[in-house]
């Protein structure tokens, strides 16, 4: 009978996520993970099998938290105000110093071109976020706050705008400029 774990999986997974987010998958070593997670390599392997499995669990954690954060941000606001609030939040996150960007976007750039599991996970998340945004756009259209049109297409456009902000943030986009871009983007959706 083995010893019980002396750590919380979700807590150490969050620490691993921070390392992968800051360094990327390829540049993260087991030694980096040991230091950040506060556990030895043997415990990492016992709990998570290998670096790859740990990484995929970190991706899942990030996507799950991101989706919940989005839902919470738009839940009790009028559609246009919800979009503005969420996009300002994205602009702030995208322009943090140092610029880490969006972990999902980072994974898409580093791994999705040659990693089917990462690509599949990110595409599933994109579909969920597009559905969420499309419903928000439909609510805005019904309320007369957002222009009529294909809500699913507008939601994809919104998702692409968010990804673009996050990439530009990694290149040094200022917070003020990011918010100006958000305001301009919202004008394209206005009724």
Image (tube, helix red, strand yellow):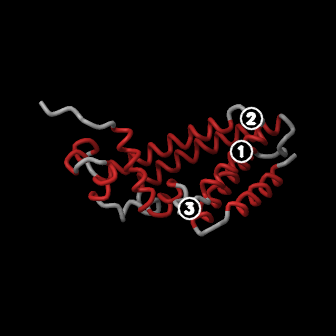
Residues at marks 3 and 1 touching, judged by CB atoms closer than 8 Å: no
Residue 161 location (% of width, % of height) = 68, 57
Using the image as rendered, state which of residue 12 and residue 163 is in the foreground: 12
**Mark nearer the N terminus (2 vs 1):** 2
The residue at the point 50 percent across, 45 percent down is: 63
SS for callout 1: helix
The residue labelled by disc 2 is: 77
Q: Residues within 10 Å of mark 2 (few under 14, many from 20)?
A: few
SS for callout 2: loop
Image position of 37 with respect to 29: above or below: above
Q: Residues within 10 Å of mark 1 (few under 14, many from 20)?
A: some
Using the image as rendered, state which of residue 171 and residue 126 is in the foreground: 171
The residue labelled by disc 1 is: 85
Q: What number of labels is visible?
A: 3
Residue 179 location (% of width, % of height) = 73, 57
The residue at the point 79 percent across, 52 percent down is: 186
Mark 3 → mark 1, Cα distance in angstroms: 21 Å
Q: Is residue 173 left or right of residue 37?
A: right
Query: Tag on residue 2?
Result: none
Query: Tag on residue 97?
Result: 3
Residue 144 location (% of width, % of height) = 87, 38
Foreground tag (3 vs 1): 3
Q: Residues within 10 Å of mark 3 (few under 14, many from 20)?
A: few
Residues at marks 2 and 1 touching, judged by CB atoms closer than 8 Å: yes
């Amino acid at each position: 009978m083995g010893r019980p774990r002396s750590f919380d999986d979700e807590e150490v997974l969050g620490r691993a996520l921070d390392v992968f987010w800051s360094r990327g998958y390829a540049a993260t070593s087991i030694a980096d993970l040991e230091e950040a997670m506060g556990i030895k390599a043997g415990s990492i392997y016992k709990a998570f099998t290998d670096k790859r499995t740990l990484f995929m669990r970190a991706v899942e954690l990030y996507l799950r938290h991101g989706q919940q954060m989005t839902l919470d941000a738009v839940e009790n606001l009028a559609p246009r105000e919800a979009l503005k609030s969420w996009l300002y939040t994205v602009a702030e996150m995208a322009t943090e110093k140092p610029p880490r960007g969006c972990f999902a976007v980072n994974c898409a750039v580093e791994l999705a071109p040659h990693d089917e599991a990462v690509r599949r996970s990110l595409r599933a998340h994109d579909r969920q976020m597009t559905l969420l945004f499309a419903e928000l756009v439909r609510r805005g259209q019904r309320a007369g706050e957002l222009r009529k049109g294909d809500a699913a297409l507008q939601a994809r456009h919104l998702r692409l705008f968010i990804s673009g902000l996050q990439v530009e943030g990694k290149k040094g986009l200022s917070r003020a400029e990011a918010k100006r871009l958000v305001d301009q983007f919202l004008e394209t959706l206005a009724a």
